[in-house]
Image (cartoon, coloured by chain):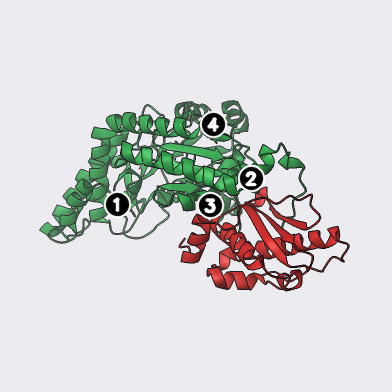
Amino acid sequence: MAYSDKVIDHYTHPRNVGTLDKSKSNVGTGLVGAPECGDVMRLQIEVDANNVITDAKFKTFGCGSAIASSSLATEWLKGKNIDDAMKIDNMDIVEELSLPPVKIHCSVLAEDAIKAAINDYRVKNGMEVLEVAKVHH
Amino acid sequence: MDPRVLDAMLPYFNSKFGNAASRNHPFGWVAEEAVDYAREQVAKLIGANEKEIIFTSGATESDNLAIKGVFEMYKDKGNHIITCTTEHKAVLDTCKHLEKLGARVTYLQVQEDGLIDLKLLEASITSETILVTIMYGNNEIGVIQPVRAIADLAHKHGALFFTDATQAVGKIPVNVINDGIDLMAFSAHKMYGPKGVGALYVRRKNPRVKVTAQMDGGGHERGMRSGTLNVPGIVGFGKACELCRLEMDEEATRLSALRDKLQASLLQLEESYVNGNPAHRLPHVANISFKYVEGEGLMMAMKDLAVSSGSACTSASLEPSYVLKSLGLSDDLAHSSIRFGLGRFTTEEEVDFAIAQTKQAVTHLRDLSPLWEMFKEGIDLDKVEWVEH
C-alpha cells in the first residue's frame, strides 16, 4: 500500500516520542486500543495552570498510519487549551495525513487517545468528565 | 522470473505463435511439440510421466480441479474430505464450497510447530473418506509436512492423497512416486517461471486416479481441463522446471545457509521467536515474531525487503494470520510476525542488509511502543484492561 509523504515523514521522524510522569497531577494519560487488535496508543499531555497544554508525548504500537496519527496529534496538542484540544476531530487527521479509508480507524484511535488523556487530566483536577461518545466512521 | 525462462518463452509470442491444438498446419505442430517438451520437463522434475501432467492457470485452479474433481468422481464411495487449518485459502475455500454441496470436511488442527498430528489424522479417517488434502510446504511458515506418512495413512484406509506443493516443488526434491502422492498442485511463478500457469499431477497407475473436469469444452488435457493452452507460459514453466531440477540442490544449500544466518542474527533481538518447526522447513522461508512490534509498521521500515506480515492489517478486518493463529499464537503475537522469503537472486549482501535494516526497525519501533515500555517495566500485558475500539 502506498503511504502519503506526511505519513512516511511522521513514521520516520516521529515527533514527541516519550513518556511523561503519569503520577503528576498536571499530566493526563490516554491509553487506547488493544494488542490483539494490532494497535495501542498512549498519549500524554502536560497542562499548565491556565489549562493550556505545554507538552505532549506519545508511544504507539501499530502500523505506520497509527504512528503518524499519534505523532501528528502531539504536534497539534501543544499550545492548545484543553477545551480546544477536545475539538480535534479524527477527520482532520485523515485529511492532514491523506489516510486511505482502511486507515481511518487509526485517526479514530488518535482522537480517542486525545480525549482519554484530557479526561484523565480533568478527573485528576476535579473537573467533570466530558462525553466522548461519537459515531465513528 | 529467471531471464533464461523469458528467453525460452519469447519466440512463442511472435515467430512461433501457433495453437497447440491445431493439428493441421505446421504452426500448430511447432506449438504442440513445444508443449510436449515442456510437459516432459515438468514431469521429470517431480518423477512423473508426462501423461500425468495437466496444465492449468495456476495452483489455485489445480487445487480446485483436484478437490472438486475427486469429490465429484468418487462421490459414490464417500463424501468425507480431510484437510488441515493451515492450508492455503484455495484449498480451504474449495472445501467450504463442497460442504455446501454435501461434503463432510474435517479441518485438522496442526501441532504448535505446524506439523500434522498423524495419530489425529488416522483417527479422523472413516470408511467415507475419499480424499486427504495436506499441503507439502506451508507458504507462511515454510513447515514441510510428513507427506509420505500422510499418504500411507490415506492409502491404508482407501483414500486418495492430494497435496498442494506450490511452495515445495523446485525448492526441495519432490517425487510423486517416493512420496506416495496421487494428485499434486504446483505453479510456475513460485519457481521463477511466469505467472498464470501451473499444473496438476494426476496419477495414472497404482492406482489410476481420475478427476471430473471442472472446465468443460474442447477436451484439452485428456478431457480434464478444456481451454486453449497458454503455449508461451507452458514453455516457460517447462524451462523453469528444468532449471530447478538442475540447480535445486545447490540453491537449497545456499539459501538455507543464508536463511539460517538471517534467523540467527534476528534472534539476537530480545523477545523474538521463530514460528514453525525449525528442522522440517523449506530452505528459503523464515517466519519470525518480534514481540511488542506491529508487523505492518515493521514492514513499512523494511520497504526494500521482500517480506510480508503475518498481520493482514492492510485489510479493514484487522485479522491476524490464520496460519499463525492455528499454531496457537495469540493475536498480538501473530500481529508481530514477519515472513522472510529468500530466492534464487538473493545475495549474501542483501541478507546482511536485511538483517541490519530489520534490527534497526525493530529497535526503532520498540522505542515507540508503549507495550515494550510496559514489558520492560514488568507489567503483565495480559492483565491490562484494554479499551478496544
**Do badges 2 and 4 share one subunit?**
yes
Pick whichever of labels 1 and 3 is earlier in the sequence: 1
What residue does disc 3 label? B297
Depth check: give the residue in front, B369 or B133.
B369
Name the residue beneath numbered marker 1.
B194
Q: Specify the subunit that label 2 lies on.
A: B
How many neighbours does mark 2 have within 10 angstroms: few (below 14), some (14-19), or many (20 or more)? many
Task: Point out the frontmost of discs 2 and 3.
Answer: 3
Label located before the other in sequence (4 or 3)? 4
What color does chain B have in the rendering?
green
Disc 1: host chain: B
Q: Residues within 10 Å of mark 4 (few under 14, many from 20)?
A: many
Chain the render paints red:
A
SS at mark 2? helix
Label number found at residue B115:
4
Is label 2 or label 4 in front? 2
- The chain that hosts pointer 4 is B
> Could you confirm whether marks 4 and 3 are on the same chain?
yes
Residues at marks 1 and 3, CA–CA distance in whole angstroms? 31 Å
Answer few, some or many: residues within 10 Å of disc 1's Cα (few below 14, many 20 plus, some between 14 and 19). many
Which kind of residue does numbered mark 1 sit on? Pro
**In this rendering, position of residue B356 left or right of residue B327:** left
Q: Is residue B5 above or below residue A108?
A: above
Along the line of sight, which residue is nearer the eye, B271 or B143? B271
Q: Quadrant of residue B253?
A: top left
Which residue bears the numbered disc 2? B332
